[in-house]
Image: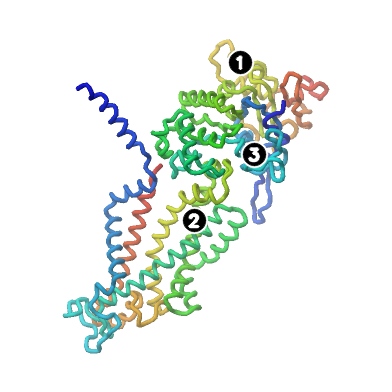
Amino acid sequence: MRPLLAVDGLTKHFPLRGGPLNRTKAVVQAVDDVSFEVGAGETLGIVGESGCGKSTTARLLMHLVPLDHGTIAFDGKAVGAGAGLSRRDLHRQMQMVFQDSYASLNPRLPVAMSIAFGPLVHGLAKSASLARARDLLQAVGLDPMLFANRYPHELSGGQRQRINVARALALEPRLVILDEAVSALDKSIEAQVLNLLIDIKEQFDLTYIFISHDLNVVRFISDRVLVMYLGKVVELGPVDRIYREPRHPYTKALLSAMPSMDPRRRTMDAPLSGDPPNPINPPSGCRFRTRCPFAEAVCADVPPTLTMGHDGRAVACHMLVSGSGHRRA
Amino acid sequence: MTDTPAIAIAEPVEALRRAQQGKSYWKRVWERLRRDKVTLAMAAILIALLTMVIFAPWFTAHDPYQGSVLRRLKPIGFPGHWLGTDEVGRDLWSRMVYGGRLSLLAGVMPVFLALLVGGFLGILAGYAGGLVNSAIMRLADVLYAFPSILLAIAITGILGAGLKNTILALTIAFVPPLVRISEAVTTQARHLDFVEAARASGAGTMRILQYHILSNVLGPILVYATSLISIGIILAAGLSFLGLGVTPPNAEWGLMLNNLRQALWVDPVICALPGVMIFITSMCFNLLSDGLRQAMDVRL
């Protein structure tokens, strides 16, 4: 089956300029050679620590920042200048919900207008756009009679995030990227919004890319999960199997750091210590080797490739490739 | 008794609906402004002044340019000339009122023109960023390096005196600060998530500017511009005082101040009158701008 979204070799390096001649002093390798596919109707979770490139990946997919290398194909059509799908077309198909529910709404516009803005710029009449906004308010569980003319500061965080979801739906997209969409909410509100997202997915026949650092939430909502570390994909696969039996040492450490309610599942292994290395000049070879308990010489020399197994799981680790030179391989 | 519940339910819902109708930002600003007595008083004084200046013939009995050698430098309260007369015997009250025309014009007009030019350039620089930003901002910096009074004197010195040149000189002097402030607020607004979200909905630059940028930057820019008016009035009067602005025999507060200077020893009170007008007007604009700034600083 053709994937709805196919990403190949996505790369974004941010140059750090400085000095009198504005020369490039260093390069932040925010996203480096990331490839994945999203099937229609599924939810792909993306997890990783802060600064691992999750949000940059989302912005690259939305073409909010130009990408350095790589291709993005939506429904089989390449996206970009001169390609099959223009940016404008892409935005009709793919929308995004941002983390900060307050900053992502214009404080000077009534929320209905914020929702109607997308349809309006795509040529729908103002009255029709506002009518759609009211319908969407209803769909996200807010009474249009009470909420349409309110301003963002008159709403709670959960209500604002519902508005943001409604705004993302206004162009009737097929894929919605949720970038830490529930992370800033209280736990009880978070659950409500998550349930809303699940309902809406069914109702509007959507595909989600769900970005979060919260492993429990990702497990709850995702079909497949992609684990990122310092701009690289380290593991990709069905969520149940990855959570039950992680293969990459980073995924293992990440999951063991996840609080569990079950005493039998508590682990005695020390979780990861320290911060991830600086994405400016990341470690050579495997980027995780500086924190990996199993690192060997080969890890410093050869960057592991993400190899897809027969079971639909992909891992980027030398230990899982026989003949890689790692003693545990 | 039986139909009370229906009313009791219908009424709160209706009331709630009305109460929950969102208040726009400008409505809130107006509500706060209405409670600010000082700002309202300043606005009232300025409106009175403006009316008087615009309808000057209705408020004056004498021709401001008709002098009389017999009635030179008459004191305040002189019959027929309640504010006295100036050094060539012209009615001082008439000259004050007519002088306000040029003084206000020379103070307000440059700010308005600079607001159009500087606001446009600043928002362009802030929104475009990159090379466009660098080009505009470095150019503004060059002008900004000179104090505005020096710049205005230099420009009128080159172009010659006169009302038009005064306005032009002050406009040029006011463009750099307005470019600066517009660029700063636009750059700030451009990086907010809602602008990014607007871009993500496939909107073009003009629509984003229209719906998302302008509504968030015009307030601070306008407040800053009103604070410049008071400086504009002082600078315009200053240029005229130096003989670089409005030319005699036109009535203008700065010029009147210069002419009456000769009579300082004869009647110091009369000499100070144009200065008092400059002071009052400029202070009113200043306090008005402060009040606006406070009213617009609504925490959202």
Q: Residue A142, located in which quarter of the rendered image? A: top left
Name the residue that disc number 2 marks: B182
Type of amino acid under label 1: Met
Give the mark toward the camera: 1 or 2. 2
Secondary element at image label 2: helix
Q: In this view, does B208 lie above or below B275?
A: above
Q: Are marks 1 and 2 on the same chain?
A: no
Contact flag, marks 3 and 1 (Cβ < 8 Å): no
Q: Residue B166, located in which quarter of the rendered image? A: bottom left
> Which quarter of the rendering shows the N terminus of chain A?
top right
Name the residue that disc number 3 marks: A60
Secondary element at image label 3: helix
Frontmost residue, A34 versus A116 = A116
Q: Specify the farthest residue to the top.
A: A264
Secondary element at image label 1: loop
Name the residue that disc number 1 marks: A268
Q: How crowded is mark 1: few (under 14 residues within 10 Å), some or many (20 or more)?
A: few
**Residue A104, x across and y down, in percent:** 51, 39
> Which quarter of the rendering shows the C terminus of chain A?
top right
Type of amino acid under label 3: Leu
The tag on residue B207 is none
Q: Specify the farthest residue to the right.
A: A323
Q: Which residue is drawn at 65% across and 46% down?
A: A16
